[in-house]
Amino acid sequence: MIITEKKSKEKILEYLKEAKSVFVIGCGRCATSCETGGEKETTEMAEFLSKHGKKIIGTVVIEAPCDERLVNKEFNKIGTKANKADAILVLSCGAGVQVVSDFADVPAYPALDSMFLGKTRRLGKFAELCIMCGDCILDDTGGICPVSRCSKGLLNGPCGGSHNGKCEVDPAYDCGWYLIFERLNKLKQIDKIKKFKKTKDYSRIIRPRKLEIR
Amino acid sequence: MNFSEALKSGKFLITAELSPPKGVEVEPIIQAASVFKSKVDAVNVTDNQRARLHLSSLAFCRLLHEQGFEPILQMTCRDRNALALQSDILGAYALGLRNILALSGDYPKGGSVRPVYDLDSVQLISTIKKMENEGIDLFGEKLAGKMNFFVGGAINPGAEPVEQQILKTEKKIEAGVDFFQTQVIYGIELFKRFFTKLNNRKAKVIAGIFPLKSYNMAVFLNEKVPGVFVPEEILKRMKESRTPETEGIKISIEIINELKPVCSGIHIMTLNNDVDIIAEILNKI
């Protein structure tokens, strides 16, 4: 899931400085799970903006604002209305904001910051698990990713700053390599990390990335 | 005899660490370092240590080389991508530098800059060796001319669990490392423990010495630097001493004498180019 974080209210009001009227769009998937852009947060945002003198033209939570097909379908319904607003505020990751921007005739602004691809540990607690390098090596590392879970993304074992399972960057962080060792020991697969690992295939992250399989 | 020849000869080696200035005032440091020039086999030059901006290690190494020092170029994977690292390796050779210490590099704390880590330290060692042995770069393209570096790697013998550090160390040996330099060490036990567990002992090891200047410094190292262990007895001596700097020098000399039979040399590090402390230790060993 894409983990998102709410931008500050001040920042949002700054984006909407010139706008007298606003249309608010939420996200039915990741941002709903993160409690940053679901039904509840979209309604709350509309109320907040209303209190700050903005006229709310409408609100809608699109099932997946990152899916062009769904946004297209939604804009066939709400487009005329939404485009009557001076601005659209989108409570989703950056992908959703960009897709909405493509369909809107007025500026669409982000209400969230896209943080990372990760897991929900419990309500309001998230952790990064994948940087989408396009060259997955989890087969060798016991299902724990050194690229995202080692601060330095090292591929051949821990640095000298790893001590008692903790990372040199912050003792609050677990050392990703420590976790990998523990897991591989448990799985009796420690030999998998004894061989030299070459650098990653960076051709997989030439931006902007596109994937066309049909 | 240059550094690599000295190491191969079995002579007990002495290296000292110098940091390039934060700014462009290179002369005072080089001038001051001349007090130990004849006593060291090489001078190890840090590369933006602690991820804080300093004059480039490569430039400072060349300046030291011009003044008759034998520099060891510290090269971290933190600040340059694989292209820039290889380019600097070639540049270093062309400038007459022959020793590299390959490090992953301290992570930039506080998010001041975006770190690179395109390569890790094992991959950097392997890349340098590939460039010299096979005459090709990381991308398989041919390089003009021959080069020959003496390549070092770092070891932290005190980091737990030791088995994980051992595995990394063995990978560095397989990648072709010529020598190791350890993290600061305050006793022989951790050193011995590490090396009895290491299967492949082909590489020579230079032990890291960091003269304590105060009790607070000892406490800081113990608590804040991962894998550095200052024994109780040393802490006590530093706390009780009325002349802690002199006591720190005395302790360093004792550690050096203790380590002498089990390592190939020592490397003396200080916080801010304390060349007088380095010189005093070297005069007494």
Image: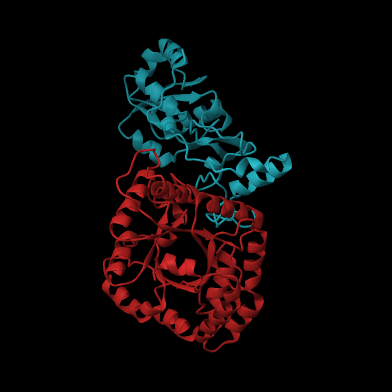
Chain with colour cyan in the figure: A
- Judged from this view, the residue extending furthest toward the front is B9
Residue B51 is situated, as x and y percent measured from the top left of the image, at: 42, 58
Q: In the image, is residue A184 above or below residue B29? A: above
Name the one closer to the observer, A107 or A20.
Answer: A107
Q: Report the residue at 65% width, 46% height from top.
A: A181
Q: In the image, is residue A119 above or below residue B197? A: above
Chain with colour red in the figure: B
Residue B115: in sight, yes or no? Answer: no
Residue B185 is situated, as x and y percent measured from the top left of the image, at: 57, 70
Residue B177 is situated, as x and y percent measured from the top left of the image, at: 49, 55
Name the one closer to the observer, B44 or B128.
Answer: B128
Name the one closer to the observer, A99 or A146.
Answer: A146
Residue B111: in sight, yes or no? Answer: yes
Residue A114 is situated, as x and y percent measured from the top left of the image, at: 46, 35
Q: Report the residue at 43% width, 39% height from top.
A: A9
